Amino acid sequence: MGETVVGVCGEGMAGLEEVAAREGAGSVDFAFVDADKKGYMGYYERLLGLVRVGGVIVFDNVLWYGAVAEEGGGDGVTESLRELSRFVAGDERVSACMLGVGDGMLMCTKR
């Protein structure tokens, strides 16, 4: 089986659906998500079906310029990123860690 790198540019969820239709479940080794931050939970759930066991999903900008760590409210993007981090931390389908690289990356390895 050949190795393939697929870049998805444009509306991300539609691109993931194309990959799912063409390659099937468990066909992805690595996914890097830098998309609509409010949609990260949707990307997470869709990618869990595409990524093989041992595969990795990385979300970019999860520290959101430090706003996710600040007390109190925040805009809708900040709250969405907090929700993703809390959810992934308790999700037994993955092992996860937050990397303080750039604006923060959330790395999830599927169990």
Image (tube, helix red, strand yellow):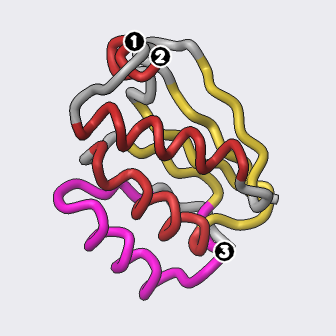
Q: Name the residue at 52% across, 51% down.
A: 31
What residue is shown with label 2? 69
Which mark is nearer the camera, 2 or 3?
A: 2
| Side of 65 relative to 56 (left or right) | left
Q: Residue furthest left?
A: 10
Point out the residue furthest to the bottom here. 21
Secondary structure beneath label 2: helix
| Residue at 63% across, 48% down | 88
Instruction: Name the quadrant of the C terminus.
Output: bottom right
> Which amino acid does the dot numbered 3 rest on?
Gly
Up-down relation of residue 31 to residue 67 (above or below): below
In which image quadrant can residue 49 be found?
A: bottom right
Taking depth in this image into account, of 96 and 77 the one nearest to the observer is 77
Residue located farthest toward the front when viewing the structure as drawn? 72
| Mark 2 vs mark 3, CA separation in Å | 33 Å
x and y percentages locating residue 29 in the rendered image = 65, 57
Tell me which numbered mark, 2 or 3, is placed earlier along the sequence: 3
Circle 2: is it few (<14), some (14-19), or many (20+) Cα within 10 Å? few
Task: Decide: few, some or many residues near mark 1? Use Cα within 10 Å; few <14, some 14-19, many ≥20.
Answer: few
Q: Earlier in the sequence, mark 1 or mark 3?
A: 3
The reply to whether dot 1 and dot 2 touch (C-beta < 8 Å) is: yes
Q: Secondary structure at mark 1?
A: helix
The residue singled out by tag 1 in the image is 66
Q: Which residues are magenta?
A: 6-28
* Residue occupying the point 26% across, 73% down: 14
**Closest to the observer, 5 or 18:** 18
Q: Which marked residue is nearer to the observer: mark 1 or mark 3?
A: 1
Provide residue 74's location: percent of width, then percent of height. Answer: 27, 26
- Marks 2 and 3 close (CB-CB < 8 Å): no
